[in-house]
């Protein structure tokens, strides 16, 4: 179907950003001629000049946001249209130029005495930047001399090469070949098709896809190990150069997250692994396998239990399912569905998948490719969670504090999924649908909490090895990964030899200490959803304060507003208890 065939009510209103491409071009020309903020260079020691600099930086930043958002959305509507591809590239180039024009500011500020920076915190004109300035003061001890900082900055492109090399291996050079699809035809084995095969019903196809996919990585294991070793050595070098105790400390301080959060996550998952093992054993029993293998881990436990709803009915179900969040939240959902926030239909050339996006001063947007499946109903709830988080933050916070950090980005979306799941479960007597939803939740927790924590622990082990002077090789990386795989998945599954090489295919490992945020996100969301369902209005009020807090403080402190303190074991215990209780319910339905 072409986009021209889609009714207007199923398209987002990009014209709410710019009424036309011509208006975009006018704004582009104006922004391109006003990028320089060099007039303030050397003047940021004065509070009045600094306030003026921040005001101008915001004006330009907001204009660039809108330019990029419009071009990006138009491009994703139909990637075949070269005009919008070019507009997106042009908008990005302005961002790069603007970044270069303002690069002097942070080194200039960090060179100031602490007393001067603290005085800025008392200045009403700099109130919107108080959190930024507090972080700047705390980070000063890790800032080097101007000459040393210049040298480190010059190495920036070198530091990125390990990720670039792996990306080239993983996306351009590696070949998986073709695989027989079970009907006599050959199908190219790609990253995307591998996921399709692993989630499919055909066990022999899963086995063959698993073996063939991993063979390609095994053939390149020494090259990939050397690349990953280089990436970790880069982390160690930068951490030591800046005076951090460890790579983990450097990564987490960069996000304003205490190291104890990372440690709490791993220890809580370890303590509750018996329930994970019990789930893996239940899967083996229900699937009826004498031996369960790693390629069986995504096989569906319950089939033919889809919610086949029209888009309108799916939206209505989402509104009802999220009713515990109150009338205001429901009214905002309806507003978004009715007023051009959402691009609904799959069309030729349109970007696949789903996402939420936005810019300060404009309502958020959501891209879907809606199909009548249960997963897509939950996708609506998920993406609208992102959208309303953005809506509340932008409405309550100044521009400098509106953008929430990646650490909390998946909380609101997952809260919505948990609430929707609970609503559907409470309203159906269909045991197959109940079992489907319970297994959906367990698989989500397994993939997002347990698996990502295993990844996080592997990263910690690898960095610790290098920090202690042990080189990383394919042999010791595989040995450590296999050890963790056995620890996390238990004895009810065969730990196939190929799984020891799984580390070699994870692109997130080149953005070190990133994956743990998926796990803390779902932990936080489960805790918040449980509190909302248990306590009602007070919990909802606290949650909306969190949604409205944007990036006004550290993400850990902001989550405390919603009742989640990740510096304690409480939210981790609550999430694990939810997993165990759900598993109990599924066992009663499937084992009779």
Image (cartoon, rainbow, N blue to C red):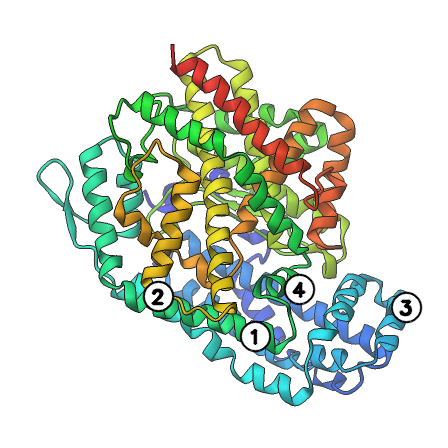
Pick whichever of labels 2 and 3 is earlier in the sequence.
3
Mark 2 — residue?
473
Q: Viewer-proximal residue, 488 or 194? A: 488
Pick whichever of labels 3 and 1 is earlier in the sequence.
3
Q: Residues within 10 Å of mark 2 (few under 14, many from 20)?
A: some
Q: Viewer-proximal residue, 585 or 16? A: 585
Mark 4 — residue?
62
> Which quadrant of the figure has residue 60?
bottom right
Q: Is residue 413 visible?
A: no
Pick whichever of labels 1 and 2 is earlier in the sequence.
1
* Residue at far left of view: 184
Estimate the x, y position of residue 96 in percent, counting from the top left. Answer: 55, 75
At a point 78% along the width and 70% down the height, the residue shown is: 137
* In this rendering, the label closer to the viewer, 1 or 2: 2
Q: Quadrant of the N terminus?
A: top left
* In this rendering, the label closer to the viewer, 3 or 4: 3
Residue 238: mark in rendering: 1
From the viewer's perspective, tell me whether residue 284 is left or right of residue 542.
Answer: left
Number of marks: 4
Residue 123: mark in rendering: 3
- C-alpha distance separating marks 3 and 4: 24 Å
Q: Secondary structure at mark 3?
A: loop
At a point 76% along the width and 78% down the height, the residue shown is: 109
* In this rendering, the label closer to the viewer, 3 or 1: 1
């Amino acid at each position: 179907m072409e986009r021209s065939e889609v009714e207007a009510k199923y398209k987002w209103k990009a014209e709410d950003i710019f009424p036309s491409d011509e208006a975009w071009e006018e704004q582009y020309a104006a922004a391109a001629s006003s990028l320089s903020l060099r007039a303030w260079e050397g003047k940021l020691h004065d509070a009045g000049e600094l306030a003026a600099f921040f005001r101008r930086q915001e004006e330009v930043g907001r204009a660039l946001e809108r330019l990029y958002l419009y071009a990006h959305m138009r491009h994703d509507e139909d990637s075949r249209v070269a005009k919008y591809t070019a507009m997106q590239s042009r908008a990005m180039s302005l961002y790069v130029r603007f970044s270069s024009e303002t690069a002097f500011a942070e080194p200039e500020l960090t060179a100031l005495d602490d007393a001067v920076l603290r005085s800025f915190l008392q200045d009403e004109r700099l109130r919107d930047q108080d959190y930024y300035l507090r972080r700047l003061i705390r980070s000063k001890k890790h800032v080097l001399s101007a000459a040393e900082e210049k040298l480190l900055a010059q190495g920036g492109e070198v530091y990125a090469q390990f990720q670039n090399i792996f990306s080239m291996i993983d996306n351009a050079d590696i070949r998986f070949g073709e695989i027989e699809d079970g009907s006599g035809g050959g199908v190219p084995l790609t990253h995307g098709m591998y996921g399709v095969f692993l989630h499919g019903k055909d066990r022999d196809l899963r086995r063959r896809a698993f073996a063939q996919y991993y063979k390609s990585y095994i053939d390149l294991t020494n090259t990939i190990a050397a690349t990953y070793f280089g990436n970790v050595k880069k982390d160690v070098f930068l951490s030591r150069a800046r005076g951090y105790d460890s790579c983990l400390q450097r990564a987490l301080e960069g996000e304003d997250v205490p190291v104890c959060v990372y440690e709490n996550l791993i220890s809580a998952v370890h303590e509750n692994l018996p329930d994970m093992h019990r789930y893996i054993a239940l899967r083996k029993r229900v699937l009826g396998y004498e031996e369960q293998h790693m390629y069986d881990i995504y096989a569906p436990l319950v089939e033919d239990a889809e919610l086949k709803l029209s888009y309108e009915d799916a939206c209505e179900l989402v509104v009802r399912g999220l009713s515990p969040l109150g009338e205001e939240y429901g009214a905002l959902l309806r507003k978004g569905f009715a007023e051009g926030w959402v691009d609904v239909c799959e069309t030729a050339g349109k970007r696949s998948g789903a996402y939420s996006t936005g810019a300060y001063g404009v309502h958020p947007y959501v891209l879907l490719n809606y199909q009548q499946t249960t997963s897509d109903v939950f996708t609506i709830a998920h993406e609208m969670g992102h959208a309303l988080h953005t809506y509340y933050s932008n409405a309550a916070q100044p521009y400098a504090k509106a953008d929430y950090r990646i650490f909390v980005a998946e909380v609101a979306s997952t809260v919505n999924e948990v609430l929707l799941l609970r609503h559907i479960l409470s309203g159906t007597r269909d045991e197959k649908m109940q079992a489907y939803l319970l297994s959906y939740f367990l698989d989500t927790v397994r993939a997002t909490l347990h698996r990502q924590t295993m990844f996080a622990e592997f990263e910690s082990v690898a960095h610790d090895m290098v920090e202690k002077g042990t080189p990383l090789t394919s042999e010791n990386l595989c040995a450590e990964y296999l050890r963790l795989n056995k620890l996390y998945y238990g004895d009810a599954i065969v730990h196939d030899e190929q799984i020891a090489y799984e580390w070699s295919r994870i692109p997130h490992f080149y953005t070190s200490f990133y994956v743990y945020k998926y796990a803390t996100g779902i932990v936080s969301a489960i805790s918040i959803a449980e509190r909302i369902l248990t306590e009602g209005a007070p919990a909802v009020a606290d949650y909306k304060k969190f949604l409205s807090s944007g990036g006004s403080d550290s993400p850990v402190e902001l989550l405390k507003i919603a009742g989640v303190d990740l510096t304690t074991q409480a939210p981790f215990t609550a999430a694990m208890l939810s997993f165990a209780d759900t598993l109990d319910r599924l066992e009663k339905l499937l084992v009779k």
